[in-house]
Amino acid sequence: MRSGSLRVIIFAAALLLPRWASAQEEALKVQRAFNAVAETARPAVVSIRVLREEVERVVEPEFFFGYMMPVEKYYRYDTGGIGSGVIVDPAGYVLTNEHVVSGADRIQVILLDGGKEKSYLAELAASDQRIDLAVLKIKTKAKETFPHLKFAAEPAKVGDWAIAVGYPFGFRQTMTSGIVSASEISMRIQGRRYARLLQTDAAINQGNSGGPLLNLRGEIIGVNSAIFSPSGAFAGMGFAIPAQEARRAYEDFLGLKPARRGWLGASLLKVDPYTAARLGLPAGAMINRVVPGSPAAAARLKRGDIVVSFDGEEVRDDADLLSYIYSRKPGDKVELGYFRGSAVKKLQVQPKSQPGAAGEDFDY
């Protein structure tokens, strides 16, 4: 190699070395941010183990004095379930999914204290199946404070880093990372309607449900709730309830702030398949009654109208419409598509807070 060429290589290396060192330092900063999130999340993210008592009725043949008689017997046994949760208050309040603790007879919360597992019993403080969120209260004999995580002040954006922490398949605490790959996702999973979800490619598996989705500051940006997977294991698409919805539900549950759920002011009926087919509709929710002075009345909805869409999203049944309305704040303007007579029409409606005197029949 000629000395001139060698000098050029040395000169180029001298120019590139500082840039390479700078890039390496930037990468190490990101790595240290992940390390810090892991340290912060470790004691505040818990494993949830649930026991449910099942009763099975069995009719067995037994012989009495030479005759075979059918005898009814009942067998009791326990079934278990696993999930994750996150402590959101130093008093020991844990946020998780409703489906993780639904029907539980006994709830055990396991957290990491100095690297060692510490087990507590917990009680269900509040839950709501419609938004798939629940709050547990850790039981303690003495007054005890717990490490906790805070909700992010700003909504997560597509492209943001996303860190999922939980206990997949009941294994030890695991942290995975990716990005927020989509938002405002509405979908139905196992008969449950989810609305306005965050989508992430951070690995989420069975057992991660109820665990937090975090940003690089270790703040909660979502509650991991569902996956899309043909095999039942992670396939690149996980979904989380946004932190703003989770925080609002948590405050409503514990009465920290007045409830801020949208209310339409109508009772609904599910449209049966025969009626839907006769009208040429895929599905919908039929208005049964309308509260005078309600948002539904102001929008001139009538008994017999069939709501088929909500802000462009298909309404398959009354549960769908409830979920959509329930996810909106009082004062939000939404567009309803409804079938009346022989045509689908559209109108604007503005849900408001439900008055206390309205009664449970008009909880839409």
Image (spheres, grey):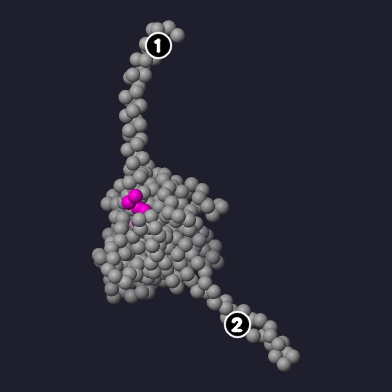
In this view, 134 is above or below 28: below
Residue 6's disc number: 1
- Secondary structure of the residue carrying numbered label 1: helix
Q: From what the image shows, is residue 152 above or below residue 66? A: above
Q: Which amino acid type is shown beneath numbered disc 2? A: Lys
Badge 1: residue crowd in 10 Å (few <14, some 14–19, many ≥20): few
What percent of the width, then of the height, locates residue 260? 29, 63
1 or 2: mark nearer the eye: 1
- The residue that label 2 is drawn on is 73
Residues 235 and 262: in front is 235
Q: Is residue 163 magenta?
A: no
Residue 129 visible to an observer of this rendering: no
Evaluate whether residue 332 shows in this view: yes
SS assignment for the magenta stretch, majority: helix
Q: Residue at x 55, y 52 (%)?
A: 230
**Residue extending furthest toward the bottom:** 65
Q: Magenta segment range?
A: 39-43
Check the image and name the residue furthest to the right.
Answer: 66
Q: What is the spatial separation of the Cα atoms under label 1 and label 2, in whole angstroms?
A: 91 Å
Name which of mark 1 and mark 2 comes first in the sequence.
1
Query: Farthest left residue?
Result: 257
Q: Is residue 41 magenta?
A: yes
Check the picture and name the quadrant holding the C terminus.
bottom left
